[in-house]
Amino acid sequence: MKANTKSLLLRLLVHLSIIITTTTTLSLLGYILYKGMPHINIGLFSINYTSENSSLLPALINTISIVAISLLISVPIGIFSAIHFVEYTHKDNKFVKIMRSATETLQGIPSIVYGLFGYLFFVTAIFKTYCLIAGAFTLAIIILPLIIRTTEEALKSVPDSLRESSFALGAGKLQTVFKIVLPSAANGIFAGIVLAIGRIIGETVALVYTAGSVAQISKSLFSSGRTLSVHMYSLWTEGLKAEQSYATAVILIITVFILNLTAEHISRKIKR
């Protein structure tokens, strides 16, 4: 009787959690769409930003650019680091334990700290100016711990029997990792990359300190430019373009959704 009561209580808690999560998510999306959709117009997609049209197209292009650059920097480093930790070191290796602890710590550091580091190191010391590449390097550092940890977990989920079968057929360690283990872990790795994309697109503070907030398409990687999140923040804080800020939020959500679908499609292609 007690067991049935506990089971019923746990089931109710699970269903209640699902209801709360779903309701909260749908409420937020509904509110943003309600406030933003009426203010989406052709002027928001002009190639040049002006105070009249408050165009978000330059910010959208800068966002896609900075996402691509950040991933190009962080994904190879993160995946290869995870491969080393899982496949080439002993489970009780002290160095690996220290690095895992460090990555977990880095995941919890506030964005403003990364922004200040990016400003002092990339903007002040290296590039001498606010620029997209400084923002991309800063974001790559921010998402690197996430990619390492998710890739590690994905590699650990691959059964050892697959590795042993590969070795039994005469394959070497490198062949086994790249031909057997990585394809089997592709879904988990891409899940981490999708989370990283969401973190990049939603980042604001770190980019204000590094990439700047020029409301035009960056002429090069070494010139300043704002992303969608910075654009939305700037419109809201100015207090004159709140409606366009909501419209930008709608486009931001759509952009994240499209990028996530693209990443999942690539993941399925690779797994096949």
Image (cartoon, rainbow, N blue to C red):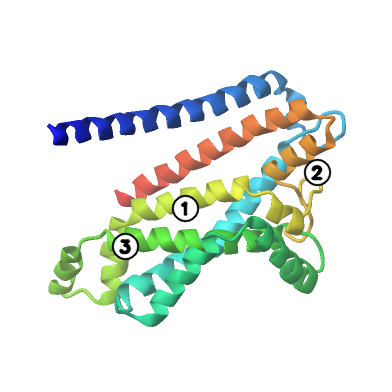
- Residue 193: which numbered mark, if any? 1
N-terminal label among 2 and 1: 1
The single residue placed furthest to the front in the displayed view is 2
- Residue 215: which numbered mark, if any? 2
Considering the numbered disc 3 on the image, is that residue within a helix, a strand or a loop?
helix
The single residue placed furthest to the bottom in the displayed view is 94
Residue visible at 66% across and 46% down? 63
Name the amino acid, label 2: Ala
Name the amino acid, label 3: Leu
Task: Report the Cα–Cα distance between label 3 and label 2.
Answer: 42 Å
Considering the numbered disc 2 on the image, is that residue within a helix, a strand or a loop?
loop
**In the rendered image, is residue 58 in sight?**
no
**In the rendered image, is residue 172 in sight?**
yes
Name the amino acid, label 1: Ile
Considering the numbered disc 1 on the image, is that residue within a helix, a strand or a loop?
helix
N-terminal label among 3 and 1: 3
Task: Report the Cα–Cα distance between label 2 and label 1.
Answer: 28 Å
Q: Is 71 situated left or right of 251 in this image? A: left
Where the N terminus falls, by quadrant? top left
- Residue 155: which numbered mark, if any? 3
Quadrant of res 220: bottom right
Quadrant of res 132: bottom right
Q: Indicate the position of residue 42 as horizontal and vertical percent values.
A: 74, 24
Q: Is 103 situated above or below 231?
A: below
Q: Nearer the viewer, mark 3 or mark 2?
A: 3
Q: Is 8 situated above or below 77?
A: above
Residue visible at 52% across and 42% down? 259
Q: Is 70 situated above or below 101?
A: above
Q: Indicate the position of residue 181 as horizontal and vertical percent values.
A: 28, 63
Q: Residues within 10 Å of mark 2 (few under 14, many from 20)?
A: many
